[in-house]
Image (cartoon, rainbow, N blue to C red):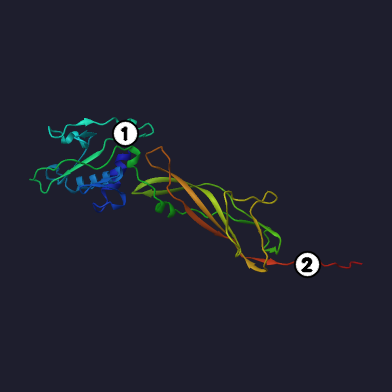
Amino acid sequence: MIGALLALALVTIAGPSFAGDIEAKSDDDVVELTAQAANRQRIVDDSSEPDPKKRLTDWMQSPSCAGDGTYTTALNFSSTYPCDLIPSPAVQIDCDGDEPQQPWWSRTRTDPAAPWGEWQQRTDWYCPVDLLPTLTQEDFRRLPIAPSSLTIQPDRGWVLVNKETIAYSDDDEQSLRTQVLGVGVDVVVKPESFTWTFGDGKPFTTDGPGRAYPQQYVSRVFKRLGEATITLTTTWSGRYRVDGSARWRDVVGTATTTTVSPAFEVVERRSVLVDRG
C-alpha cells in the first residue's frame, strides 16, 4: 500500500533535480542522497525511458562491501575489486523492528550503445520508514492551527488601574489532516509555551496556560489609564503519521499562533461616602 501511494505521488514530479534532499556528501561528482531522494530520482529515471535497454541511468540495490580500502559493491566485483561484505546493518541501524534496506547504487552511460560505468553508491543502509514523506517545518507552519483561547479576569470590559488583572488559556491538543506529496498525513499539535504581553509591558513566557482565580499564576498590574489589550503568542510542537504507517514521528521545528484580546479600559475607581440619613 505504501509503495503504491509513493509511486503514484513521486512519478508526477516534474524534474530530476532534488537539491532540497541532497546531503552535503559527494565523491567524484557522485552525490549521496537520502533514501527518499534516491527513490524519487530512481522513479524519474525509470519512467523517463520505459525500455531498460535504452536507459542512460541504471539503479540497483546491493549490500556494501570493502575492497582495497574503499567501499564498493558486489555489482562491481572482479579480480580488481575483491569484495568482502561489511558487517550486517542490523547491528548498525535500528529500524524499530523493520528490516534494514540495502543501499541504492546507480551507474550511467553516455548513450545506449556505450558501455556502462561502474556502480556508484547513492545511499547508505536505511529503514523503510525513511521512504515515507516528511512533514517539514514549512509544512507544519502552513497548517491551519487554531489560535489559543484567551480569557481575562475580571471580564467586564474594564479593569482597575494598580490592581491585578488575570489571564489564562488552555493546553488542548488539536488534530489536523493534510497531504505531503499527495499522501495523507495525520498531525497532532500541542502547545509547548505561552508568551504574554499585557498592554505595552514587557513580554514574558510560561510553560503552562495559566489558571482562573484563585489559582492564577499569569497576571500583571496596569499602571496607566486608558485602552489596553493582552496578546498571547502560543508556540506549538507536533507529531505526525503518514497513511499506511502506524508510526508517529516528531515534527522538526515549531509553529506559533497569536491571540489578541478585545480592547478594554484601564480605569480608576474611588470610594465615596454617601449620607443615607
Mark 1 residue type: Pro
- Which residue position is annotated with label 1? 100
Q: Residue 134 location in percent, x, y?
A: 37, 46
Residue toward you, 16 or 86: 86
Q: Residue 38 location in percent, x, y?
A: 26, 44
Q: Residue at x 19, y 34 (%)?
A: 67
Mark 1 closeness class: few <14, some 14–19, many ≥20 residues within 10 Å: many
Residue at the outermost bottom position: 226
Q: Residue 18 location in percent, x, y?
A: 28, 51
- Which residue position is annotated with label 2? 270
Q: Residue at x 26, y 31 (%)?
A: 86
Mark 2 residue type: Arg
Residue at the outermost left position: 113
Residue at the outermost front position: 69
Figure quadrant of residue 219: bottom right
Figure quadrant of residue 87: top left
Residue toward you, 14 or 193: 193
Q: Which quadrant would the N terminus be assigned to in this image? A: top left
* Image mark count: 2
Left or right relative to 133: residue 200: right
Q: Residue at x 29, y 35 (%)?
A: 101
Residue toward you, 7 or 264: 264
Q: Name which of mark 2 and mark 1 comes first in the sequence.
A: 1
Q: Which mark is residue 35?
A: none
